[in-house]
Structures are given as C-alpha cells and as structure tokens.
Amino acid sequence: MTALTKGHLLSSFWVVDRRHFYIGSASMDWRSLATRKELGVLVYNCSCLALDLHRVFSLYWGLQYRDFIPSFWSKRLFALYNKNAPLDFTLNSTKAQAFISSSPDVFIPKDRTNDLEAISWIIQEARHFIYISIIDYLPLVSSNAHKYWSRIDGLIREALILRRVRVRLLISCWEKTQPLTFNFIWSLRSLCMEQANCSLEAKYFNPRVQRDGSLQGVNHNRFMVTDRAIYLGNLDWVGNEFTYNAGAGLVISQPEGVEDRNSTVVEQLRAAFDRDWFSHHTRSLQANKIPVCIKHQINQLVPVKDSHMDNGPMPIRTAQHDTASAPMRNSHRDDGHTLVKTRHHDDRMNPQGFADGLVPIIDSYLEMGQVKISNIDKSQLQNKGGYQDNPMDPPSQSAESSGSREMTNRSL
C-alpha cells in the first residue's frame, strides 16, 4: 500500500466463509486482543453483506500482482450496495438498511460509497443528536501550511447551527495528540455560546500516567451514532487519513418509529457511547485549558530551556516514535508540504490499557442470523425471516462469481 498510495493498509475486518464478518477498531495483535478499549460489530449469517465486504478484500488481494493502481476495476469488484441503493433486510424483527464503504478514492470501484461520503450522509441525515467517539480529530491536511480540511468539520457546524442537532464529541487524549486538536474543538464549542437550542459537548478519554511517565489506557474506538444510523470505521478523522490510507466502514440505518428500540443496533451503540461518556475515565474539555496528557507531551518534546515558544499560537508538534514494535504511519507530501503525522493502529497506545470487560469477546453462536456489538454483553440481533441465504459456491469457484448469482437470486 505504501508503494501505491504512500499510505498504509489500515482496514480491520474479517470475512469468514463469505457468510459472517467482523468489522471494527480492533487489529489482529496482542494489544487489541488484551489491553486496548476496542469496539466492533459481529454479523452472522448475512451472506449479502459478507460478500460485499469480501470484494473489498479481493481488491486488496489483487493489488499484490500490480505495481500500479488500475484506472478501471473489474466488474467482479463492483460494490453490491451503497448509500443510494443499500441492502434492505431485517434485524431482530426490525427493518434496517446497510452498506459497506471504503477509502481511499483511488481504491473505489464502481458503485462503492467512500468513507467520507458515508460519514457526510449520516451527519446530514441526523435530526436529533450526533455522538462521535474517535481517537484523533484534526481537520488539517498540511502541518506546515496549516491547510484546513473542512469536510467533516463543516458538516458538524451546519448540523449545530442550521438544524440544531445536539453533538457530543469524545476523543482520545494521549501523548501523541496534536495540540491544535483542542483549538478546533474549542472553535466548535464557541459556535453555541449564548445561543439557544445549540449544544456541543466535548470530552476526552483520560489516560493514567504511570511511574515511568508513560500513559495507560487509550479509547481506541472509531464510530458515530445518530438517532437514525451508525457508522463504524477503521480510520481517524484526520485530513490525510482518507486520502492515503486504506480503510473500510459499515453503515446501518434503522427507522425511528420502532417499538422496542433497545433491540436495534442504533440503540446498542448509543448505550456503548453513553457508558463511555459518563465513565469516570472521561473528563470535560475546559475552554482554553490544555489537558494534562498534552502538557505531558509538551514537557517531553519542548524543554523550557530550549523552547522558543512565545505568547503566540501554539505550534504543531508531530509525535515522536515510542518504543513499541509497530511502525508510525509515514508522513506524505502534498504540494511540497509535510502532512500531519498519523499513527499505525499498533502504535496508538502503550502496552498497558483497560482490560476490565472493555475488549471485544468473540463467542460462538448456534442461533442463526445474529449481530452483536462486540463489547456489550447480551446485545444480540437476529435476522428473523428477513431473507433466505442463497447456496454458496464450491470453494474452487471465485467469490466474485458467487456474488453475481447471489445478487440475482437473493430474496430479502
């Protein structure tokens, strides 16, 4: 991926037998499986969505034989569903729609919705609230030129001012957080000063400082939930993430007029967000006050005797390499400027982290058609008569060929 896009393969998903799949924030490493606070979705017995996600994998797999990015993709890699034509199915006797998104644009075949379009669509469709849990939020592309990346930031401002949607933003605060992150959040909060029916709340997930000065515990989630839909992705909300790095996302939307809201994926993910929001590990962001984790970073990177900082704006400081085994995400060039550095999944936090029921537990299920939010106990959704599974191809046949027949013969 670095040779093709100057980025990295950051997609985190599993596809099993073209029938089940997992997608979320967890990587396949010891930190994600033992110490980090992750969140993902497990979908069982849904061959339609699993096949669509498998096509994303097939695209990656085929690139190993090329030293360039094709201008035209094979029809076998075309998306089966998108935001304009989602999959209609039933989750626990509740109607729902879903589709798979991906990034970057150079890896988008015909009919595939990219991650930015999916995020934008969900924000624009929200009517009551938007809850966001993300590691890094920084609407900048170039650190030298301070190039503003307005795509998501502008949509949040429109939702606040024009539609009076309540917004809650939960970010991870740790030693590699860019100081300007909080400037942009303070800017968002200032929009609602002395305005009725305008609400933007911001909190940061507070890590604990160990005796050796390292920070323990980082919220590794990457999701958004509104009154109508959810989005789970693999990328941070930083300008150059969606341009260079390869990631995938899952969008599920459900109607508001549902009698048993507790059974829907939307309500389950909202409950997961509320648990984190009201946790004693979170701290409210105070105006013009830099959180302790950022002070820790500044003290490490800029000693007072060597500092040239004056009373002007705080300069952007790129994060330093730590002693972890995982590499940093490479910085890229854009119009001659150095882009803001972002980190690889495995370099998000120190080896210590939360382990008290906050990591995903993948259980085996005998019941058919279940969907589970991976870090919520007893949160299962069942496909009850939503569609019939279609016969699968023999293993020797390609998944793409199988997908063509499933698209033709499926009954939803």
Image (cartoon, rainbow, N blue to C red):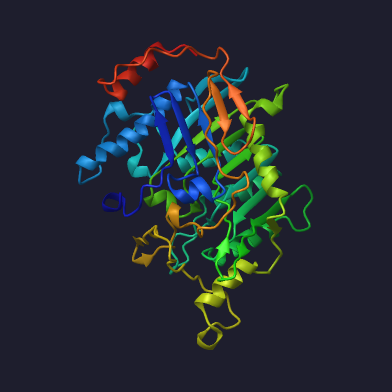
- Give percent across and percent down for residue 92: 62, 20
The image quarter containing residue 326 is bottom left
**Which residue is rendered at x = 29% and y = 21% of the image?**
395
In the rendered image, the vertical position of residue 403 relative to residue 222, given as above or below = above
- Give percent across and percent down for residue 34: 52, 48
**Which residue is rendered at x = 38% and y = 49% of the image?**
245
Is 370 or 222 nearer to us in this picture? Answer: 370
Q: Is residue 83 visible?
A: no
- From the viewer's perspective, is 9 left or right of 140? left
Q: Is residue 41 visible?
A: yes
In the rendered image, the vertical position of residue 25 relative to residue 259, given as above or below = below
Residue reaching furthest bottom? 305
- Give percent across and percent down for residue 243: 39, 50
How many marks overall?
Answer: 0
**Which residue is rendered at x = 58% and y = 29% of the image?**
253
- From the viewer's perspective, is 143 left or right of 276? left
- Give percent across and percent down for residue 283: 70, 58
